[in-house]
Image: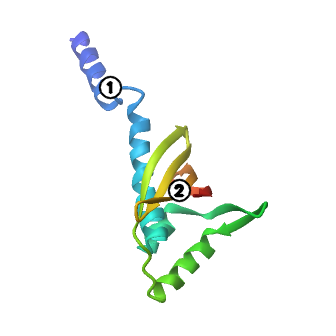
């Protein structure tokens, strides 16, 4: 009887454990992509749902740029305010799409390299930094190259 209980216990444990070590990162990768599309690409680039942007970006996010050899900083609150003004003015940019080139996850940190395309042209290569918080992944920083 005790062997049967042991066998059933082992089976139950195996059923709740991931099938292999790669199953967790795959779901993290999917979660990260599912966050970036509505929060960043649809929200900020395509003037979409900014509530999804607010949910996907950490409040301390900063976009770092390089202009004329000088580092520039754009906090997420300022970027959202600028996007809200463009939406209110009725601006409708051409549709921006993204191509995920790399998603690299180590524990609770991730880096995503993606390309943004508009009207068939590559316009930016972005590097987004993310951390996993108790309520999920959040974009915390960005650097980019304008093509």
Q: Which residue is identified by label 2?
A: 138
Residue 135 appears in the picture as rendered: no
Q: Residue at x 71, y 66 (%)?
A: 73
- Residue shown at the point (48%, 68%) measured from the top left: 45
Farthest residue toward the bottom? 89
Q: Position of residue 59 (x, y in %)?
A: 60, 66
Q: Residues within 10 Å of mark 2 (few under 14, many from 20)?
A: many
88 or 99, nearer to the observer? 99
Q: How is the image coloured?
A: rainbow
With 42 as the anchor, is 13 left or right in this view? left
Is residue 72 found left or right of 113 in the rendered image? right
Residue 95: percent from left, percent from top: 39, 69
Question: In which quadrant is the C terminus drawn?
Answer: bottom right
Does residue 91 appear anywhere in the picture? yes
Residue 39 in the image: x percent, y percent? 46, 64
39 in relation to 128, above or below: below
Observer-nearest residue: 99 or 118? Answer: 118
Q: Secondary structure at mark 2?
A: strand
Pair 1/2: label in front? 2
Q: Earlier in the sequence, mark 1 or mark 2?
A: 1
Using the image, tell me which numbered label, if any, was put on residue 59.
Answer: none
Observer-nearest residue: 61 or 46?
A: 46
Compared to residue 57, the image places residue 13 above or below, namely above
Mark number for residue 13? 1
Q: Residue at x 60, y 69 (%)?
A: 76
Provide residue 50's location: percent of width, then percent of height.
46, 73
- Quadrant holding the N terminus: top left
Q: Is residue 135 left or right of residue 3?
A: right
């Amino acid at each position: 009887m005790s062997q049967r209980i042991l066998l059933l216990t082992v089976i139950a444990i195996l059923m709740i454990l991931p099938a292999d070590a790669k199953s967790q990162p795959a779901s993290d990768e999917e979660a990260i992509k599912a966050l970036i599309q509505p929060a960043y690409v649809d929200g900020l680039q395509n003037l979409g749902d900014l509530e999804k942007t607010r949910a996907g970006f950490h409040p301390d996010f900063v976009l770092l740029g390089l202009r004329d050899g000088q580092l520039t900083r754009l906090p997420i609150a300022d970027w959202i305010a600028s996007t809200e003004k463009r939406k209110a003015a009725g601006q409708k940019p051409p549709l921006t799409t993204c191509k995920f080139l790399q998603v690299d996850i180590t524990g609770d940190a991730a880096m995503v390299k993606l390309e943004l395309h508009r009207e068939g042209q590559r316009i930016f290569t972005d590097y987004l930094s993310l951390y996993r918080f108790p309520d999920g992944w959040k974009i915390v920083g960005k650097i980019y190259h304008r093509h």
